[in-house]
Image (cartoon, rainbow, N blue to C red):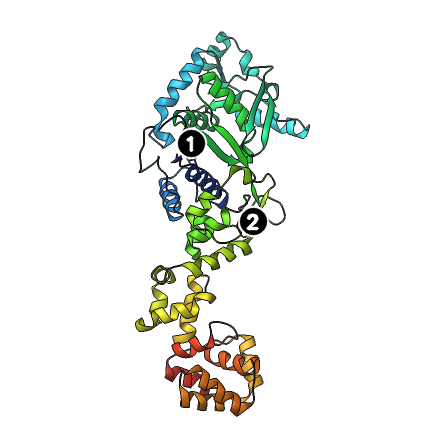
Amino acid sequence: MTALTLKTRFAPSPTGYLHLGNVRTALFNALLARQQDGIFLLRLEDTDRERSLPEYSRALLEDLRWLSLEWQEGPEVGGPHGPYTQSERQVLYRHYYALLEQREQVYPCFCPPAELALVRKTQLSAGQPPRYSGACARLSEAEREARRARGLPATLRFRIPPGRVVEFHDLVRGPQRFSSDDIGDFIIRRADGGAQFFFTNAVDDALMEITHVLRGEDHLTNTPRQLLLLEALQLPAPEYGHIALIVGADGSPLSKRHGSRSLRELREAGFLPDAVNNYLARLGHTYDSDGWMEPAELAAGFAVGHLGRAPARYDEAQLLHWQAEAVARRADESLQIWMGTAVWARAPADRRDDFIAAVRPNVRFPADALDWAERLFGTDLALDGEARAAIESAGNDFFRQALAAYTAHGAAYQPLVEQLKAATGARGKALFLPLRAALTGLTHGPELARILALIPAELARRRLQTWC
């Protein structure tokens, strides 16, 4: 890799299944790398020992691959900067902790967590930003040794240099400026020896030669801390861009009450990966085209300058729109697998292609395909309220004539409807709705001609005869 090669990364914590905010961050970084012919790196930040579980790591890799967000460096792929799981990088971290200790840029902090929480609460109540007081920074070495002798646990805090202004250009939000006097000394190593996010995230970005980081705006205030830390370690810093968070319709952070689901739940419901990508790529990012885009087009049209600063509102109707577009474009062979074995247990093997062609415009999920398989080939037919009303409005004589027309012409759509029209005088909805309702139990759905061609003749006659 040359020094000019753009490299992005996605660095999730495997403490649960990927949610849409995580996935969008991964997608934006992958698209930026593809657009610039760069490298997309995956790193697992599993320093939370209690919550980081192997099953979540496996699910994360599987879900990213399902979306075709393939990484060129990372777990199961390798690369020159491994290992790519932070739990395996402890030796590296110890080296950089030691450097900071040698330079006296860190100090042990013995303040009890409960005491720190109380101070933080008091500061917030007073409208002040929470900031560490620096009490342990003023301890002498003798005082520190006394506390160690008493067995008091200690975290490791990074000293923020006073009187500094930290400035950087945010790729999304433009020039940013922070006073170091507003930033408290922060913990980079827990009392149990575990590494903290501020430290491992920044160090790994530098060591893995990350050049660009797109991450949520909730990390914006972390950036000056990490820039100061990297400066102290004499390590290079990437360019940061902080993207707007996803919110619900009410403007509050996206959650399950807004209809949000994890990526795994979307997969299980039958959402297609291209639908998810087309939706998320536009959630807080604009394209010149509003139409469907293939993966290469999503990458080619991606631009950091098109990332918005305003909160991105989750809209499930839009996600469903892209799902319908994805189903419309899916190859028959792939759609057959997606629909599932339960569908093909009902639909005759020799009618599969015809069934897919007929129901595709009316299917968004495998459950929809199963419903149509049952309606077109099942022995029991459930009618909705509109269908029952249409049948009752047409009357028995209509269906006697419909049965006669079907007996004469079978599935030949045009002569059948012409005979039925001539016999009953029905036109438009009065002709088609009751016929569709009696055959499928619904007043909407696939083209009536396709329905007639698919329903077994004996089943069609029996359904029409029911209402004679």
Which residue occupies the foreground of this view, 170 or 60?
Answer: 170
Question: Residue 75, labelled with which disc?
Answer: none
Q: How crowded is mark 1: few (under 14 residues within 10 Å), some or many (20 or more)?
A: many
Q: Mark 2 points at which residue?
A: 314
Q: Which amino acid does label 2 sit on?
A: Tyr
Query: Of marks 1 and 2, which one's residue comes earlier in the chain?
Result: 1
Q: What element carries label 2?
A: loop
Q: Which residue is drawn at 55% across and 15% down?
A: 161
Question: What element does badge 1 sit on?
Answer: loop
For image coordinates 49% across by 91% down, the residue present is 401
Report the side of 219 relative to 379 (left or right). right
- x, y percentage for residue 210? 42, 29
Give coordinates of residue 410: x percent, y percent: 40, 85
Which of these two is toward me, 297 or 55? 297
Q: Which of 15 and 212 is in front in this view?
A: 212
Q: Quadrant of residue 408?
A: bottom left
- Check the picture and name the quadrant holding the N terminus: top left
Q: Is residue 154 at all visible to an observer of this figure?
A: no
Q: Which residue is drawn at 51% across and 20% down?
A: 228
Circle on res. 6: 1
- The spot of residue 31 in percent (x, y) is 45, 41
Query: Which residue is rendered at x = 42% and y = 46% of the image?
Result: 296
Of marks 1 and 2, the one in the foreground: 1
Front residue of 99/350: it is 350
Q: Residues within 10 Å of mark 2 (few under 14, many from 20)?
A: many
Left or right: 10, with 428 as reference point: left
**What is the C-alpha distance between the residues marked 1 and 2?**
30 Å
Question: In the rendered image, is residue 293 in sight?
Answer: yes
Q: Where is residue 131 in the image (x, y as percent from the top left)?
A: 60, 23
Under mark 1, the amino acid is Leu
